[in-house]
């Protein structure tokens, strides 16, 4: 009898345990609220008044969700303390709070239990628990090495523009912001002043791509020296390369004669700006041209790139490159009347493509909902509102200049969208839903409906 009682108590404790998706959602919210409270302190702003809570919450959410949308200028409004708070929030949000928690636990000699491993698995979007702690260590080490190289290069380059101390500080801030695909800057106009600077452009672009390609892909490429990559890495690298190439070519052609963007630049400047603007919508948020001067067709192209975003297990957002690739591959296989979805001599399960279709559909529905609500609360142009919504959902940070003029409700809607885009719609759905899925095991007879 006592044994049965103990088993019942244990099962009740198991039920009360927070699921990994719920832990991630609560963890991100906790970091955001802590950051928001710090930014309301008098020492966080230059004027000594602190930021109003709604603006502090917006900024903290944008930093933790590595978005980059701002309601106040980061460089002129925040003190060094406020800027460092934002920098830490970007780093924690980009690598994930579970990465830091794991590293602290390892340093303290604490063993990572099964529940913590499951949370890491959810955070890194991995299919198995095998090697998950090793991946966390690799994420931390890879971020440190890559960011250190970025800081060194930008410090040397910017030492010609500023004194060494300022050059180092600016290099550190923008390197962390670039690698974590955040898009926060201290210049007030992003990187427009460095439009023709090859070293700055190439360094930031490489940091963005490495941060957005996914740590598992970097690990796979490094360990296998680029040969015999797994299917995930193969799809990510090719999809990323294709999107960057297509985006750069289209931007170059569409904006070639636009005097407000790249029309007055030479061929080198045009190509550099086109490549930069093709990479940065992949959730980074920096820009080297005047975004409000873009043609509508270019804006639409950037919206598509922002919607797709980076890759799974990276510092970026969006629906992810693999989600986009899975949906496209399933469409082609359906049109070709193929029973299996195949690529690179491998097959992709129906479960994966169904999940990809669900993610894309939910993302489109969310963007339509938020954009529709913004048309009721804001007086801005529809294209600007759609751009802002997709930028927030894709955790990009690019804007057509309406962020600072958003109403209270508009800011709240964008805050929710940034959080949703960073944590993930499915993760939020799973965190809200019940942990027990035993009632979903019954199999019912199939029946056909007419579609299309």
Image: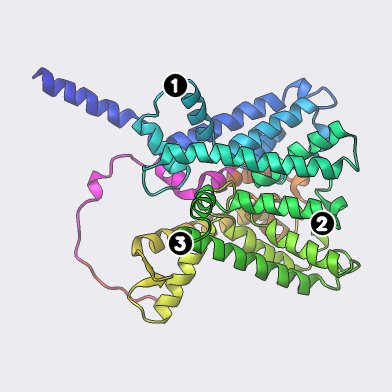
Q: Residue 437: within the magenta?
A: yes
Instruction: For the C terminus, give its image quadrant.
Output: bottom left
- Depth check: 245 or 410 in front? 245
Q: Name the residue that disc number 2 marks.
A: 198
* Number of the label disc, if any, that sits on residue 228: 3
Q: Quadrant of residue 13?
A: top left
Describe residue 148's horizontal placement relative to residue 201 as left or right.
Answer: left
Foreground pick, 438 / 115: 115
Residue at image mark 1: 109
State the extent of the magenta-drawn residues as a range. Answer: 419-445
First along the sequence among labels 3 and 2 = 2
With respect to residue 333, does 89 lie above or below?
Answer: above
Total number of numbered discs in the rendering: 3
Give the alpha-carbon distance from disc 3 to disc 1, as whole Å: 36 Å
Label located before the other in sequence (3 or 1) = 1
Q: Earlier in the sequence, mark 1 or mark 2?
A: 1
Q: Nearer the viewer, mark 3 or mark 1?
A: 3
Q: CA distance from mark 3 to mark 2?
A: 33 Å
Q: Residue at x 84, y 66 (%)?
A: 268
Q: Give the x, y percent position of residue 305.
A: 63, 62
């Amino acid at each position: 009898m006592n044994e049965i009682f103990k088993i019942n108590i244990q099962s009740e404790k198991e039920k009360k345990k927070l699921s990994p998706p719920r832990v991630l959602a609560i963890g991100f919210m906790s970091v955001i609220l802590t950051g928001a409270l710090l930014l309301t302190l008098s020492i966080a702003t230059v004027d000594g008044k602190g930021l109003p809570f709604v603006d502090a919450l917006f900024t903290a959410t944008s930093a933790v969700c590595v978005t980059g949308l701002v309601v106040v200028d980061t460089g002129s409004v925040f003190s060094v303390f406020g800027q460092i708070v934002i920098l830490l929030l970007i780093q924690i949000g980009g690598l994930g709070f579970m990465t830091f928690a794991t590293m602290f636990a390892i340093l303290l000699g604490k063993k990572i239990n099964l529940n913590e491993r499951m949370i890491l698995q959810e955070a890194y979007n991995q299919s198995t628990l095998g090697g998950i702690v090793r991946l966390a260590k690799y994420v931390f080490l890879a971020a440190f090495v890559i960011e250190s190289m970025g800081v060194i290069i930008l410090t040397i380059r910017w030492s010609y523009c500023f004194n060494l101390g300022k050059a180092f500080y600016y290099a550190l801030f923008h390197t962390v912001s670039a690698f974590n695909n955040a898009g926060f800057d201290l210049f007030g106009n992003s990187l427009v002043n460095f439009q023709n600077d090859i070293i700055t452009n190439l360094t930031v672009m490489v940091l963005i791509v490495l941060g957005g390609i996914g740590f598992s892909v970097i690990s796979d490429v490094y360990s296998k020296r680029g040969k015999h990559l797994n299917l995930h890495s193969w799809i990510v690298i090719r999809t990323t390369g294709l999107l960057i190439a297509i985006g750069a070519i289209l931007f170059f052609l569409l904006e070639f004669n636009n005097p407000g963007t790249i029309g007055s630049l030479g061929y080198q400047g045009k190509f550099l700006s086109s490549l930069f603007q093709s990479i940065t919508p992949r959730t980074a948020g920096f820009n080297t041209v005047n975004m409000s001067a873009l043609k509508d067709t270019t804006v639409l192209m950037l919206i598509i790139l922002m919607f797709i975003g980076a890759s799974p297990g990276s510092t970026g957002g969006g629906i992810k490159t693999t989600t986009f690739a899975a949906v496209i591959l399933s469409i082609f296989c359906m049109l070709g009347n193929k029973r299996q979805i195949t690529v690179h001599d491998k097959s992709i399960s129906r479960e994966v493509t169904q999940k990809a279709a669900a993610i894309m559909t939910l993302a489109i529905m969310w963007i339509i909902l938020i954009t529709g609500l913004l048309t009721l609360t804001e007086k801005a142009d529809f294209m600007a509102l759609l751009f802002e919504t997709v930028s927030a959902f894709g955790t990009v940070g690019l804007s057509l200049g309406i962020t600072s003029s958003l109403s209270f409700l508009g800011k709240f809607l964008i805050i929710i969208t940034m959080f949703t885009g960073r944590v993930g719609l499915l993760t939020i759905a799973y965190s809200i839903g019940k942990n027990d899925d035993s009632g979903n095991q019954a199999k019912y007879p199939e029946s056909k409906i007419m579609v299309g």
